[in-house]
Image (spheres, grey):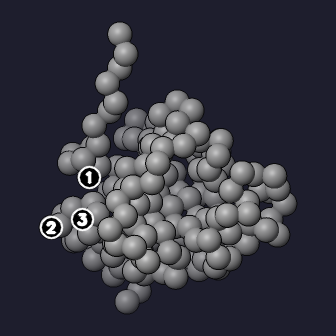
Amino acid sequence: MDRREAVAHFRDVLGREGVRPALRYLNSLGPHRFTAVFRFEGGTLRNLHLIDRDDPTVERCPDQPVLDSYCIYVRETARTFLTEDSANDERVAGHPKQAVVQSYCGVPLMEDDGTLFGTICHFDYQAVPFDEDEVYILETVGPMLVQAVHRTEWHPSPVAA
């Protein structure tokens, strides 16, 4: 299946079955263990969905400070950030996840008005390369995901008075 067919199939699964099945499909396209959707909420990185290929019962990971995730690089630039081997990537030297998450590709998720919503990412504890198709697919499905999350599943935290 080429990348255009993969995007079309993702769109179909998203429309028929929802966000989690679509993310499971997305995760099945590449070698990385995890696929996740995160939302930026101030200094907090809120996990909305997590697909763990090795443990299908996992739905989310704990929220964390944005600074403790590679998603910080996406937030700082509003651009795709990729590291295939963090142990040998000087750009992430000293980062809290450098010794844990060895490969990461995060793509910005943008609101219609251009505001940065969060990220869609693939990552793994092992150093695993990314190919152009994986990055293309993540970048292409991002706008579909933002709309689907808003329609069906994301509810903001209550605002303190």
Q: Nearer the viewer, residue 63 or 142?
A: 63
Residue 121, position in %: x, y?
Answer: 51, 61
Q: Earlier in the sequence, mark 1 or mark 2?
A: 2
Q: Residue lying at the far left in this picture: please name it.
A: 16
Q: CA distance from mark 1 to mark 3?
A: 8 Å
Question: CB of mark 2 within 8 Å of CB of mark 3?
Answer: yes
Residue 66, position in %: x, y?
Answer: 59, 41
User: Which residue is depicted at the point 79% across and 68% down?
Assistant: 87
User: Which residue is depicted at the point 54% across and 43% down?
Assistant: 64
Assess disc 2: are there few (<14), some (14-19) or many (≥20) residues with their C-alpha within 10 Å of its C-alpha: few
Is 122 positioned to the left or the right of 59 in the image? Answer: right
Tell me the kind of residue under disc 3. Leu
The residue to which callout 1 is attached is 148
Q: CA distance from mark 1 to mark 2?
A: 11 Å
Residue 98 lies in quadrant: bottom right
User: Which residue is depicted at the point 58% across and 64% down?
Assistant: 105
Residue 18 lies in quadrant: bottom left
User: Which numbered circle lies on residue 16?
Assistant: 2
Instruction: Name the element at disc 1.
Output: helix
